[in-house]
Image (tube, rainbow, N blue to C red):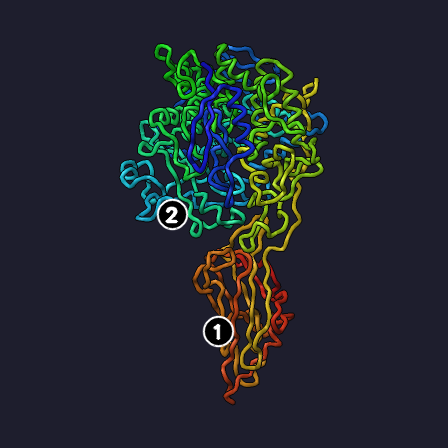
């Protein structure tokens, strides 16, 4: 019996259907073109079908190790490894591990520049655009900085608050107390799940796409290490992979005996996160809470835990030479996460985003990589185990008996990883049945055998939502199969598809941001868009920054494209898209970008280019009432940082003035006082340019140059997080003199120079602005 699995998501209800392969494929194609309608920033279903032949589980669309046990996993064996320079294809069965290169080694020389080196170099930079946590400021992208720092200290207990919409964890109080010695050994009341990557153009850290992205990047480095080394991208790729794995290690909590007792699989909530449109550096957890979701014994998340296990197992082999101790820790944690996932079955609750139907494919994906990393056959047995003629291992989800076959029309993606699993299972075992399933899938997508949907321009097409992430993932599996079978037709197909993405398509546009002569402009990505005004997708009109290397969702089935920031099914960019692209590019570099002398295409020099420096801090002002009794000064204090955007809680300004006009009345500086008439800091409406509800700290007067009668008042915004401009208005008032009249005259005030009188603000050049006491804008006397 031949079984084809297809699932249709309609408003979160999943209906499993079974057909023969032809009928099911036609229905899959129909659904890909007519999938669920979308609403809001990103609706509750980011694509279509799920596990089985399914594809998209998403909905809506943004290393310390907390282990109690020892990291005592064995590093991968050297058996079966080849010299890194050996480009021969491997022959099944029994291949345990690939060449073990040091990704830190730079190439001795490059060949000429070429598109695959440039595209790979740029595609890796998209990960930098989506980093979360610390260690970002001063990195490869000057417009990205540290963000979501609150993730490093999320309160464990909710104390009566809604765990789905508050800054706390979703674990039960009883469960936390049971394992408090693991979660909070220092008794500080918080848990550390910082780091990792944002999902797409938003800032949530979702479990399934994050695990998929890490495993795809690691898989590419495992299969095609020469692509990263010969293109000079090895260190960058390692940095990215280690940021993924360190986040997984940090998110894994283990008892002293090594058992996993919790795995943090999500930080943030889509429905909250998507109400904010601005750079992640400026998204305040107090205004947009970031709950942490955990897979535990009480609330299983076998899909996300095993997905992370797969990524860690792959990474343990990729990093075994560059950092053997860290690689061993990754492998040990991968084993523990897999055991935890296999014992506590059930898919994680992602809050309606990236819903998973089941975990069997993720478990099989982890098991196949754990076998490769350890050589232990028990992991393969977990996949293919039978009782009589009945499958009882992970394959039992898609095939009931050993007489059943399976036709896989969907591609390897965050929601279903059967495709990649069968490719590796076939390679490891040489089994005819697994080889047929893997090869039928690759033949379908590459056009060697099977009826797939192809656009008029030649793109193999699966779904209108992010079609290029599916296409590039299919390229990756085809290229791995080409390496395994030494079949050039698969490489030729992948190359034709990548050329379409590069710009050889009816629109003549590249679908990789910043690559080629022309690409769509309006990318659905908050950080790159850089909006700081009115929470608007359309201000600024075009993105402030280039999201280098981002793979756009892609065209429709007729090769058209909607270049609109709101049309996120086409214009959004994501880390899972990036990993599919990087893996395909690595395979094509391996096959097409290394010459007969072993020299690979050269990357761009001095990339990325620096953006033009912009004014980030300044003060504007105007004069209100100024009649000899009072001098009213109205100011706008600006923080419009872009490299990177950030709050500065140590800002202050100084207004310099002179009391010289009071001398003839025997008065001095002590006759002056400040009366605040409007304090923007005291207003907190949740917007970026609002204050924190506290008063600005006024102090002075202080002497600047008493000999020349120059003094100043200091206005400190200490602790206030605001972005944009915040208004601050005050009156400088002098006491009445001996004739019972005030004799104030602001015309001799240093900071009064150049301020217009009336309704229009002008630059307050002589109002000095400071950060932690250091002058950052304006002039001093």
Label number found at residue 396: none
Which residue is nearer to you in this view: 236 or 128? 128
- Above or below: residue 521 compared with residue 601: below
Q: Position of residue 508 (x, y in %)?
A: 71, 35
Q: Position of residue 193 (x, y in %)?
A: 42, 39
Query: Circle 2 is placed at which residue position?
Result: 166
Query: Circle 1 is placed at which residue position?
Result: 675
Name the side, left or right, on which 606 lies relative to 405: right
Q: For the point 59% across and 76% down, which residue is it?
A: 746
Q: Quadrant of the N terminus?
A: top left
Classify mark 2: residues with Cα within 10 Å, few (<14), some (14-19) or many (20+): many
Q: How many marks?
A: 2
Classify mark 1: residues with Cα within 10 Å, few (<14), some (14-19) or many (20+): few
- The kind of secondary structure element at disc 1 is strand
- Spatial separation of the CA atoms under disc 2 and disc 1: 39 Å
Which residue is nearer to you in this view: 145 or 660? 145
Q: Position of residue 217 (x, y in %)?
A: 54, 28
């Amino acid at each position: 019996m031949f079984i084809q699995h297809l699932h249709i998501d309609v408003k979160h209800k999943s209906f499993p259907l079974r057909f023969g392969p032809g009928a099911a494929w036609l229905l899959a194609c129909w659904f890909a073109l007519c999938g669920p309608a979308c609403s809001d920033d990103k609706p509750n279903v980011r694509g279509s079908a799920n596990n089985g032949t399914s594809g998209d589980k998403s909905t809506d669309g943004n290393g310390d190790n907390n282990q109690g046990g020892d990291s005592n996993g064995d590093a991968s064996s050297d058996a079966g490894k080849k010299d890194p320079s050996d480009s021969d294809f491997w022959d099944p069965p029994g291949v345990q591990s690939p060449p073990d290169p040091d990704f830190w080694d730079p190439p001795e020389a490059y060949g000429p520049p070429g598109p695959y080196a440039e595209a790979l170099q740029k595609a890796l930079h998209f990960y930098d655009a989506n980093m979360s946590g610390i260690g970002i400021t001063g990195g490869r992208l000057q417009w990205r900085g540290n963000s979501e720092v609150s993730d490093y200290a999320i309160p464990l207990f909710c104390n009566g608050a809604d765990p789905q919409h508050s800054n706390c964890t979703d674990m039960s109080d009883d469960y936390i107390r049971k394992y408090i010695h693991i979660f909070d050994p220092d008794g500080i009341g918080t848990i550390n799940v910082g780091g990792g990557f944002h999902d797409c153009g938003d800032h949530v850290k979702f479990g399934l796409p994050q695990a998929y992205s890490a495993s795809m990047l690691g898989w590419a480095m495992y299969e095609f290490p020469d692509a990263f080394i010969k293109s000079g991208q090895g260190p960058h790729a390692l940095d990215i992979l280690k940021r993924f794995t360190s986040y997984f290690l940090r998110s894994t909590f283990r008892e002293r005996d090594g058992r996993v007792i919790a795995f943090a699989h999500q930080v943030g909530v889509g429905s909250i996160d998507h109400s904010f449109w601005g750079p992640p550096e400026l998204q305040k957890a107090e205004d947009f809470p970031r709950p942490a979701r955990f897979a535990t014994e009480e609330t299983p998340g076998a899909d996300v835990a095993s997905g992370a296990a797969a990524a860690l197992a792959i990474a343990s082999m990729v990093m075994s030479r560059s950092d053997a101790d860290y690689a061993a820790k990754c492998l040990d944690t991968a084993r523990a996460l897999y055991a935890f996932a296999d014992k506590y079955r059930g898919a994680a609750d992602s809050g309606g985003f990236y819903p998973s139907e089941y975990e069997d494919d993720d478990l099989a994906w982890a098991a196949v990589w754990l076998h490769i990393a350890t050589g232990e056959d028990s992991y393969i047995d977990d996949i293919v185990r039978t009782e009589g003629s009945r499958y009882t291992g992970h394959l039992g989800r898609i095939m009931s008996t050993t007489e059943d076959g399976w036709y896989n029309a969907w591609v390897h993606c965050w929601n279903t990883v059967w495709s990649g699993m069968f490719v590796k299972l076939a390679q490891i075992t040489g089994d005819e049945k697994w080889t047929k399933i893997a090869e039928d899938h690759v033949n379908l997508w590459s056009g060697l055998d099977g009826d797939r949907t192809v656009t008029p321009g030649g793109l193999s097409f699966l779904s209108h939502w992010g079609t290029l992430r599916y296409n590039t993932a299919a390229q990756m599996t085809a290229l791995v199969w080409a390496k395994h079978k030494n079949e050039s037709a698969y490489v030729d197909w992948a190359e034709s598809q990548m050329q379409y993405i590069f710009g050889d398509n009816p629109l003549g546009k590249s679908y990789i941001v910043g690559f080629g002569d022309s690409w769509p402009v309006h990318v659905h990505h908050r950080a790159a868009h850089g909006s700081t005004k009115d929470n608007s997708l359309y201000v600024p009109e075009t993105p402030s920054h280039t999201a280098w290397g981002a793979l756009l969702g892609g065209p429709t089935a007729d090769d058209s494209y909607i270049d609109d920031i709101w049309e996120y099914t086409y214009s959004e960019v994501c880390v899972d898209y990036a990993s599919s692209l990087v893996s395909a590019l690595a395979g094509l570099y391996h096959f097409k970008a290394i010459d007969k002398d072993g020299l690979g295409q050269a990357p761009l020099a001095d990339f990325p280019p620096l953006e033009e420096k912009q004014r980030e801090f300044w003060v504007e002002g105007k004069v209100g009432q100024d009649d000899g009794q009072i001098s009213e000064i109205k100011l706008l204090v600006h923080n419009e940082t872009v490299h990177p955007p950030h709050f500065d809680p140590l800002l202050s300004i100084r207004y310099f003035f002179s009391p010289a006009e009071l001398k003839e009345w025997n008065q001095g500086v002590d006759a002056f006082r400040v009366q605040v008439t409007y304090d923007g800091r005291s207003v907190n409406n949740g917007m970026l340019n609002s204050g924190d509800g506290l008063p600005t700290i006024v102090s002075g007067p202080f002497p600047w140059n008493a000999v020349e009668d120059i003094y100043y008042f200091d206005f400190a915004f200490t602790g206030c997080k605001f972005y944009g401009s915040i208004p601050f208005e005050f009156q400088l008032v002098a006491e009445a003199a001996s004739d019972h009249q005030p004799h104030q005259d602001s015309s001799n005030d240093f900071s009064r120079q150049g301020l217009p009188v009336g309704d229009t603000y002008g630059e307050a050049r002589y109002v000095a602005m400071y950060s932690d006491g250091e002058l950052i804008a304006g002039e001093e006397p």
